[in-house]
Image: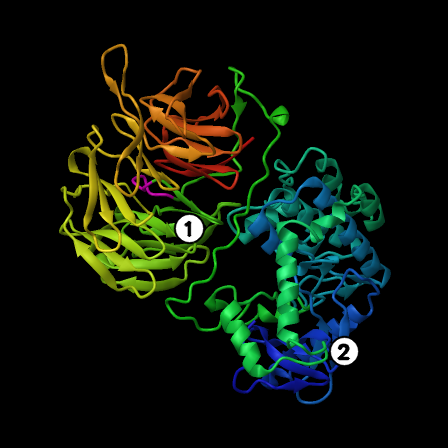
Amino acid sequence: MYPLGTGDPLRLGPYRLLGVLGEGGMGKVYFGQDSAGGTAAVKVLRPELAHDQHLAQRFVREAQMAQAVASKGIARVLGSQMEGGRPWIATEFLAGPTLDEAIRSYGPMDDPTVRALASTLANTLHDIHAAGLVHRDLKPPNIVLTSAGPRIIDFGIARPEHGLTLTTTGQVPVTPGYGAPEQILGQRVGPPADVFSLGAVLTFASSGRRAFDAGHVAAVQYEVVHGEPDLAQVSLALQPLIGPCLAKDTGLRPAPGQIASAFAPPRGAERAWRQGRLANDIKARETGVQQLTTQPGSDTSTTVSRRRLLTTLAAGGTVLAAGGGGAVWWLRRGDESSGSGTESKAASGPFDIPPAVETPKARILDRKQAATTKTGELKLAPLWGPLAVNAGDSPPPMAVRDVIVFGARNGGLAAHSVVDGKMRWSAPEIDTAGGYISLSDRLIAAVGLGGKLVTFVASTGERKWTAPAAARCVLAADEDSVYVVTTDGQVRAIGRSDAKVRWTADSPADVLKEARPSAVAAQGRLIFGAKGGVVVALDASNGGKAWTFPSGAETVNTPAVHGSTVFLGGKNLTARRISNGNEIWTNKPYEDYTGELLLWSTPTVNGDRVYAMRGSWAQSVSLTDGNTVWDSTTPPKGDSRSAVQVQSSFAWIMDYPWVVGMELDHGEAVARYEPSKASPTLGFTAHGNRVFVMTEESLTALPVF
């Protein structure tokens, strides 16, 4: 929500307007409060459009459609005024995320929650149809999750059941992937169309993926009419319930009452709206509404002052969703050239950084339901991909909450959604050879043209601060600074709060000039590998040398930090004090039967174990003393030098050219993914119950078990 601006009314009807929820080319939606303390989303046409007969008629029709439905499952119309210079509609304000926001933030819903969602939505559709209406645009953004359960909003294109056409002049088309086949074909649209949309919504809620998807809109619509829904990631228990809703033949789709009965949730499933992370999100939004509409020590009828409103907005950010009902169609019909056009964002400075979004976690699959290879290992079928989107020489992919970041095929940096692989943003001016790092999962920092240090909001790609750092590559970051290697081999610290140079220091050993050194910053130390396999630790406050250590390897893998300890690979696997480099323990070097020294890879800390590759063999050692817990029990089929990554109950390794999942308890290989033989695995990362595999040609997301 944003403060009122010049020209915004202070009051409409009984509502005092406290802020702007959204704005588009057609009008605005305000957050309002009446004299009794009640809140509302108040929608207003722009003054210059109020005399457009078609728009005014649609405005009136929307209010009439919503008012005709007697159901607790929709956002109620509280009042309206159709006459005069500024027609407005006030609808119930819903404090909660939309379904698509919730799935992006918290991942697919479990079966009991999907059943609770389906039952409520089906009963609401029954009420809508009982009023003689068809909603016609049921989709995740039009479903708001509140502490009282899901609510359906936006009657912008609702019609009486006898309404026939899809594209009456001025009417928005159906949302690709959610509109029924008969809507796409311009045929008669009745209640079964809403049932089809419900099936598509439940598929998305259950799997995080659309039932119908393709590269462009026309292809999606073709799949809806002629293709089969993708229910592969929907649980086996829900597939037979959702599938009939997506039948091409309207006569084969169940009625909403039948759906409500079939999806009857187990006892207590409705607690999903009152307990857990989603419920905490809803509660935070409700608290935000209360804080904005009441003053300490007063009753709820006292409205907040404009000064306090602005102070709260500036200090606490936006915690309210524009879910007041019926606002979607017109907020999205503004200037389409500016992107989605859903809202007009308030201007923000380069150091006004939004909080990190939640990680949308994928469903952990049941091993018993998975296909197996000839050797009995679980077969890893992609969640999405392979997608030909990455450059063949891209650094390994980096997962940051809801995006996966990598070097784009056409140059520069790209970020795609971890949920479905779709592009979220790109930055063609970035030199990916300089690497990229995450700043508290809120920003991405990378090297731009002319050696500038450039930052982007991780989730959206919005450009933030830049610094003329003369950087060749980025090293690491802590809460205070970003550390880079300059073009002349020095180490430089750039402040995260002001983009100014904190210090520049000569390295006590030659920093590798041909490649990006591996580094970590923590506990007041910047630790990285230098020429000849020397580990260097600098004082992060001034760049002075803290300590050095010879790793015994030609190059140094990325250190790992846990508390006040740093773990280093190389000739030995060793744990040392971050402050002074003193040894805590060392797991000695090994030689194979040929006498070749088996070097340790980048270590990974998980729980009370440290995992690393010793040559081509995965190892698990004790965090406290370095003693070996297990060696991998299955001989490697290929060659691996990558880090071990832990996700779910597996330790994942790159057993070139494959990616292999091993049991955390004993190291047995139980899952395997084999990419195209023409394009073997180059790198991978694990995050949010997904494993992202990069080859020379493509990027693929795999599930975990």
Considering the numbered disc 1 on the image, is that residue within a helix, a strand or a loop?
strand
Q: Which residue is mark 2?
A: 79
Q: Residues within 10 Å of mark 1 (few under 14, many from 20)?
A: many
- Residue 150 versus residue 698 in the image, above or below: below
**Identity, as a three-letter code, of the amino acid under mark 1:** Ala
Q: Main secondary structure of the magenta part?
A: loop
Indicate whether residue 319 is drawn in magenta. no
| Residue nearest the viewer, comparing 625 with 176 | 625
Residue furthest to the top: 593
Q: Which residue is mark 1?
A: 415
| Residue nearest the viewer, comparing 675 with 166 | 675
| Residue nearest the viewer, comparing 86 with 631 | 631
Tell me which corner region of the image, top left, top right, bottom left or bottom right, holds residue 618. Answer: top left
- Give the side of residue 124 with respect to residue 54, left or right: right
- Quarter of the image with the N terminus in it: bottom right
Q: Residues within 10 Å of mark 2 (few under 14, many from 20)?
A: some
Residue 515 is situated, as x and y percent measured from the top left of the image, at: 21, 41
Residue 426 is situated, as x and y percent measured from the top left of the image, at: 38, 55
Start-end of magenta stretch: 390-395
The residue drawn where x is 54% and y is 16% is 376
Query: Is residue 306 shown to the viewer in this render?
Result: yes
Q: CA distance from mark 2 to mark 1?
A: 43 Å
